[in-house]
Amino acid sequence: MTQPDDDRSSNPVPAPASPDRPTVNPKRSLAVVGAMFLMAMSAAGPGFISQTGTFTVQYGASFAAAIVASVLIDIAVQLNVWRVIGVSGLRAQDLANKVIPGSGYVLAGLIVVGGVVFCIGNISATGAGLKNLFGLDPRIGASISAVLCILIFTYKALDGTLDRAVLVLGAIKIGLILYLAIVTNPPVGEAALRTVAPVGLDFLPVLTLIGGTVGGYITYAGAHRFLEAGTTGRENLTSITRGSVNGILVTLVLRVALFLGILGAVTAGAQMSKSDPVGSAFGFAAGPVGIALFGLVFWTAGMTSTIGASFTSGTFLKTLSPFVAKRFNLSVSVFIAVSTILYLVLGQTPAALLVFAGAFNGLILPFGLGLMLWIAWRRRDLLGGFRSPAWFLGIGVAAWLFTVVAGVLSLAQLPTIFR
């Protein structure tokens, strides 16, 4: 565990850290950036890429409004969750148990179940990506990717390897998506107009993006990474807030660039495959090379999301199992291995299972977010007396009300999923 900032100074009498001027620590700075990218890359994983392609083809420029709506909800959720968890120095499930005894175990169970399902989907995405990139059998590609993920966690994972891996993979994904957005020459003006005046946009894409980008484990991925790195307490409030905001900005750039890249291909008259619209956009932009580039994008998305889902699920399992707390890296590796075996046994990622997980996330989000907001408002004793500004709570409550509606709609979908 990283030592407190004031214990690592080389000065005989170290200057006390403060919210305005925290002590600089290179290792902790890496963890801050890693947490930011872990959250951002988890919020723009394979599911988001596929959804963006499908909905952009269906709704055109008007889908920009759904992108913006999902980012606004993201801002409200992440700002409140990061600050509550970061200032308290406690994981989300442990905070929940202090508010309503037993609720933390329920929250942890929900996160882990959703995490397993999405980890299966993320592993399958790595296999699909390597198939496009190298022509490998998806099962072989998924197995190789799972081994790489396990190595990231077993090779001094919490001493920089995890953060560096997420940074490198995230940078590759962002770079390739920005390339797509530039080459396809999208109608930016039309997209900007439809952001505030959408035509024919249903509520479904907004609901789907919310569940897939801030639901389930994604809500807590970055905040728990901060926690594991020891960046907690009021003295680190500036770093915590800055990390959440910067993570959201990275997410915004990635989401908007992907949307614009696909929109450019659609507007130019590209033949878009219903089963793989994003691959079609890359193929339109760069021909056969574009298909390989899309494979690289999908592989990096699957890798970063597998890392995010397994790491965050592991931090929740710590409360459910003392063994996980003592053997965290090993437990996360087992989590990845089990998810990979399930994918190999199933042969493919069942569509109904992923739909179920998306609906499941719609139920988890208001439950966990509601507890975090209650702590910020009424349980200052858990935050060392810290009072969150009223406007922070205001945007958080507005987001919570939206997630309640989304959760009710998700609940209504559950009986029809496995028919």
Image (cartoon, rainbow, N blue to C red):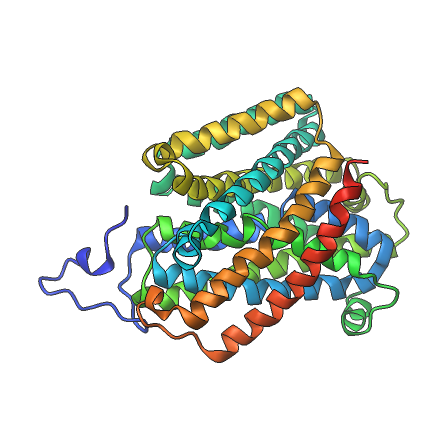
Which residue is most to the left?
A: 12
Q: Is residue 69 left or right of residue 244?
A: right
What residue lies at 47% left-to-right and 27% top-to-bottom? 334
For residue 300, say whether it is visible.
yes
Instruction: List x then y, in percent, for residue 68.
Output: 69, 66
Task: Note whether 109 is above or below 202 in the view shown.
Answer: above
Instruction: List x then y, in percent, for residue 198.
Output: 83, 69
Instruction: List x then y, in percent, for residue 22.
Output: 29, 67
Instruction: List x then y, in percent, for residue 373.
Output: 49, 66
Which residue is most to the front?
A: 101
Q: Is residue 102 left or right of residue 176?
A: left
Q: Quadrant of residue 7?
A: bottom left
Question: Which of 302 and 343 lies nearest the eye of the viewer?
Answer: 343
Task: Note whether 387 is above or below 120 in the view shown.
Answer: below
Q: Is residue 419 left or right of residue 324?
A: right
Task: Note whether 147 is above or below 205 in the view shown.
Answer: above
For residue 30, say whether it is visible.
no
- How many numbered marks does the figure carry? 0
Q: Quadrant of residue 268?
A: bottom right
Q: Quadrant of the C terminus?
A: top right
Question: Which of 188 and 221 lies nearest the eye of the viewer?
Answer: 221
Q: Quadrant of residue 296?
A: top right
Which residue is most to the bottom?
A: 390
What residue lies at 32% left-to-right and 72% top-to-bottom? 385
What residue lies at 74% left-to-right and 62% top-to-bottom? 66
Question: Which of 146 and 381 lies nearest the eye of the viewer?
Answer: 381
